[in-house]
Image (spheres, helix red, strand yellow):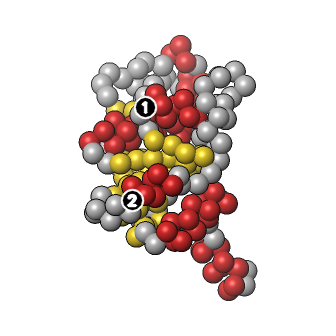
Amino acid sequence: MTWWKRVSKLKRDKSKSEKRVREQLESSGLDFGYECEKFEYPVRIRLPLVSVNSAKDIHNPSLWRRMTGNFHEIHTYTPDFFVKTKSGKTVIIEVKGEFNASDREKIRIMKKVYFDKGLDFRMIFDRSKSKFSKTNSKTYGEFCDQYKILYADKEIPNEWLNEFNK
C-alpha cells in the first residue's frame, strides 16, 4: 500500500452522511469534535454453562444449567459528533444510515445510563421513515419518538443550528 492511500483512509469519513454533517458543522462555524470521546456501558450476558460432562454436551442446550445473578460485559460507544454550543453546552450527534438491532440496543442502554442524566443526544438518519425490517413495521423515527430522542433526516436542521449558535 502506498503512503497516499494510507493518509486518505485516515482522513476519509465513514459515510457520505457523516461527511455531509461534518461539512455542515464546519460551514456553520461551530466548535465540534469527531469521535473524540468514548462511553462505557454494560451489556448483560448470559453464562449458560456451569459444568458439562464432555465436549459433546456443550452443544446440547437441555444439559446447560444457568448461573444465577447479573453478569455484564463492558462495551464502548463512540458517538460521531460532539458539538459545543455558544452557551457552553455539549450536544452529541449520531449519524446513522442503517439502524440495526444492536445499534438500537446500544442507544437504549446509553439513554438509560447517560442521556437521561443530562447529556443532549440527537440522531440524524439518511431516512427516518425506514422500517426496521419487512416484518417489523416500526420506523427509525418512531423509535426516537418512543425514547424521546430528537432526530432529523439527512442534515442538521436550521432550528438546531440556531439553538447551537445562541
Q: Quadrant of residue 42?
A: top left
Which residue corresponds to the image point at 55% horizontal and 18% vertical from the top-left? Answer: 61
Q: In terms of depth relative to the viewer, which is nearer, 30 or 57?
A: 30
Q: Position of residue 69 (x, y in %)?
A: 30, 25
* Alpha carbon separation for disc pair 1 and 2: 22 Å
Question: In the image, is 38 to the left or to the right of 133?
Answer: left
| Residue at 67% across, 60% down | 16
* Rendered view: 45 above or below 23: above
> Which label belongs to residue 119?
none
User: Picture coordinates of residue 21 (x, y %)?
Assistant: 57, 61
Quadrant of the frame with the C terminus: bottom left
Where does label 2 land, which residue?
A: 164
Number of the label disc, if any, that sits on residue 147: 1
* SS category of the residue bearing label 1: loop
Neighbour tally class for label 2: few under 14, some 14-19, many 20 plus, Cα within 10 Å: many
Point out residue 26 in the picture as x, y percentages from the top left corner: 52, 71
Quadrant holding the N terminus: bottom right
Nearest the camera: 115 or 72? 115
Residue type at mark 1: give it: Tyr
| Residue 78 visible in the displayed image | no
